[in-house]
Amino acid sequence: MGNKQKRDRNNLIALTGGAAIVAIAVNFAIFAFNKKYRNKTDVPGSRVRVNLSASEILKLAESIINKSNQVHEAVASVPLDKVSYVNVISPLAELEAEQFPLIQSCVFPKWLSASEDVRKASAEAERKIDAHISMCRKREDVYRVVKALTVTGDGLSTDAKSFTRFLVREFERNGVNLTLSKKEELQRLTANIDELSMQYIRNLDNDCSFLLFTDMELEGLPPEFLKSLERSEDGKRKINLRSHQISPVLELCKVGSTRRAVAISYGRRCEDNVTILEQLIQMRHKLARLLGFANYADYATDVRMAKSSSKVFEFLESLSASLNDLAHRELSMLKELKKKEEGESPFGMEDLSYYVKRIKDQQFHTNFGAIRQYFPINLVLSGIFKICQDLFGLSFKEVEGAAVWHPDVQLFSVSDLSSKELVGYFYLDLYSRVGKYAHTCVIALQNGLLNNGSTQIPVALLVSQFEKEVDAHPGLLQFSEVVNLFHEFGHVVHHICNCASFSKFSGLRLDPDFVEIPGLLMENWCYESLSLRLISGFHQDITKPIKDELCKSLKKWRCSFSALKLKQEIFYCLFDQIIHSTENVDINGLFKHLYPKVMVGLPLLGGINPASCFPRTAIGYEATCYSHIWSEVFAADIFAMKFHDDIFNLQAGLQFRNKVLAPGGVKDPLEMLSDFLGREPSIQAFLDSRADIN
């Protein structure tokens, strides 16, 4: 570490003139801020540590690992005939609760710290802690002790039994119960799968393919977009086959031949990835069989709300069939519009984004640039707080003088509106800066806990990259950013209201099929007139909210012409399920066979192979691509059933808070939703929301 610091100092000294002054100023600002804020009082009830130095992060990581080793060694030493809740489950549960906020204290600076040294130390600490946790999950000695407790029972409570079963399942999904030879095979498979997955992504990242077009061939694209493109020697514009350049072309370019050329080239990138994906699928099936599953899809869904691949197929096929009529009507209208504008050329999948936007623009005249003028950041935030107060019985108050890692960061306490009891805390780190994570997300810093009278307060962090107020002009949000902020605030509320008896079942580390539902549910309040008027105000006169006509237009715009695009998503989800539930699938043949069955009359582009550029099924969402649609459907059902007629229904909001958010992962998600709705969840409300608009 000392050598690294010396190198940094030498680099600073080597700078000259204005660059040196700026560098010195930045380093002095960081030092001055840390000196000012490091000594502020900690937040009562929070173990989260902010403003740790690089050396402190690494020391804390070592302390975490040492403590964990001590506890695991103690548990492993318990004789199998002496196992009990007190000497097995309680130590492991307490370790989880105590260490999670400390682990997060080491990890979150990697995304947010202004100091490069701190970010590097945080990344190193994360690698060490992850490696240790992975090792702990494979400890056969601890597994035998925990497994023994499932046999004796030892008068465990229902929640303790769930926690014990969870630990056993976690161990067994890591192959702890396998023979030595099978463990070695599992280790080889896991390493090969990881390497192939990364190779698939590297191939996409390293792909430098591009197409050249004249300005005439790019007609319809905004001047600022055209100016951002490189030019070739003959003056043509270069379109790199990257989503940030492809999407505007497919959505805005008036020239059908250009859209087609771009779509074909984009869909046949990295053809070597097809072979990699085939190898990945074979290895995943082998891994699943080693662990006792028929196929990889069943392995992936076993720990999720869906429970099995067959349930996913049933869900996707039912949804797809129910959308057929609406998709047919949409396609007919799109074809008619293309015929008017481009003549008799056939309508293809390359035309979908362009003509959906054309029809929406004609029907709704929605100017999102003008709409942005009505969403100052602070007004949107105060509106969100008010909505959550009226809906979930929560009150929000900024904690003045709390230690934070940047002057822009705010800390809020959340209390129950009725009892005034503290519920939790959350940090807001909303504004862009150098070195900061570039997306919007929520990070759980400390999980809530309520067990045997002892409590632990949940702490969350919402991160974004909004433009800050400059020269007294308020930062304004794009409407898409407003929707995203509502979504992420749904996760904040979920985390804050979630207080299970075990830390393992609290926070956001819940069933992935379930955890997105609160966020997707909250998005609905962005499309209702009453709530839109509450969160909006013209930036030069905030007493003038967005007009009702525009509110109604936004609601219609949201779901109009969505059936075809949704069926396209369902197609990819079905493809993902089929390859991960069936052996020896011909990927090229599957695309050609499956596409016309799902995409009612919309022809597949010749010569493309989307399997070569489908990263979700390569890493991160393998056999689980369906999950977002699943959550979206259930969120629509909740809103239609409980809030459609009264978006500020406090009784329904409190029931949702207590029956769905509060229990955490200790209860089956389907049972919680069924209890809240008074029936099993249904796809009908989701379908109705599309049909009504269209």
Image: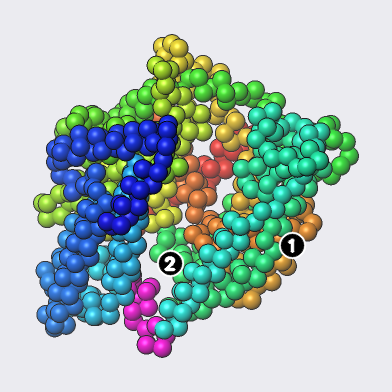
Q: Which residue is mark 1?
A: 592
Badge 1 density bin: few <14, some 14–19, many ≥20, Cα 10 Å = some
Question: In the figure, residue 549 lies in which quadrant?
Answer: top right
The residue depicted at 47 percent of the width and 15 percent of the height is: 538
The residue depicted at 41 percent of the width and 88 percent of the height is: 181
Q: Is residue 214 left or right of residue 661?
A: right
From the viewer's side, name the closer residue of 62 and 640: 62
Q: Nearer the viewer, mark 2 or mark 1?
A: 1
The stretch drawn in magenta includes residue 519: no
The residue depicted at 41 percent of the width and 11 percent of the height is: 543
From the viewer's side, name the closer residue of 383 and 60: 60
Amino acid tagged 2? Asp
Q: Mark 1 and mark 2 in contact (Cβ < 8 Å)?
A: no
Residue 64 in picture, x, y percent from top left: 21, 61
Question: In the figure, residue 226 lies in which quadrant?
Answer: top right
Q: Which residue is mark 2?
A: 302
Q: Which residues are magenta?
A: 169-183
The stretch drawn in magenta includes residue 174: yes
From the viewer's side, name the closer residue of 538 and 346: 538
SS majority, magenta: helix
